[in-house]
Image: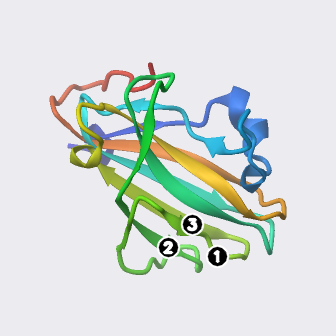
Amino acid sequence: MRIFDELHCVSLDSSRAASFADFMEGTGADGYTYTDIFNLAKYRKAAFVIQMGAGATGTGVVTVESCDDVSPSTSTAVAFVYKVSTTFDVFGDWTAASSSGFTTTAGANACYIIEVDASELSSTDNFVRCKITEDTDSPTDGCILTILGQPRVMLENPITAIV
């Protein structure tokens, strides 16, 4: 078995790539930066890997939202865990974050892994997204890769989780 037989990676939508060039600046219609909304009905875990590149002072508040549908009609911030690397491949310990999230640290070349369990989603919600709210107004290059894991049903080729 290969490592990615148990994972489903979702690459960054190329139509969103430009919006992540300065992703701490808030690119959504409401001034926030969001990932796509992912369906966790077929997976037990979602991980958002945030890679920050150039930008020495920009920071953002990272939260994870449970969504009732793909619009979403309602979204609720939920608890999650995360770890940080500022040295390219050495990560700190897992840290529990409340629904208020955490603030990234200023500096270039940091990587954050955010993991949420489907059981943390609100009520009957099956959908999840990551949200970044600008904290310090200073452009920061970066991107977010989403990885879904622990499929409820193992398939040779995982089904899409973007709906």
Name the residue tied to disc 2: 84
Please provide percent x and percent y for residue 100.
47, 62
Residue at position x 46%, y 23% from top?
Answer: 70
Quote the CA–CA distance across marks 1 and 3. Answer: 10 Å
What's the residue at 79%, 74% (across, down)? 57
Q: Position of residue 130 (x, y in %)?
A: 51, 46
| Residue occupying the far left of the picture | 153
Q: Please tell me how crowded label 2 is: few (under 14), some (14-19), or many (20+) other residues with Cα within 10 Å.
A: many
Comparing marks 1 and 3, which lies closer to the viewer?
Answer: 1
Task: Identify which residue is drawn at 42% across, 43% down.
Answer: 76
- Helix, strand or loop status at disc 1: loop
Q: Earlier in the sequence, mark 3 or mark 2?
A: 2
The foreground one among 90 and 16 is: 16
Closest to the observer, 92 or 73: 73
Discs 3, 2 touching: Cβ within 8 Å: yes
In which quadrant will I find the N terminus? top left
Residue at disc 3, secondary structure: strand
Q: Which mark is residue 111?
A: 3
Residue under pointer 1? 105
Q: Residue 81: image x %, image y %?
A: 36, 64
Label 3: how many Cα within 10 Å (few below 14, some 14–19, many 20+): many
Furthest-right residue in view? 138
Q: Earlier in the sequence, mark 1 or mark 3?
A: 1
Q: Is residue 86 above or below residue 111?
A: below
Q: Residues within 10 Å of mark 1 (few under 14, many from 20)?
A: some
| Three-letter code for the amino acid on which mark 1 is drawn | Thr
The tag on residue 158 is: none
Q: Residue at x 44, y 44 (%)?
A: 65
The amino acid marked with disc number 2 is: Val
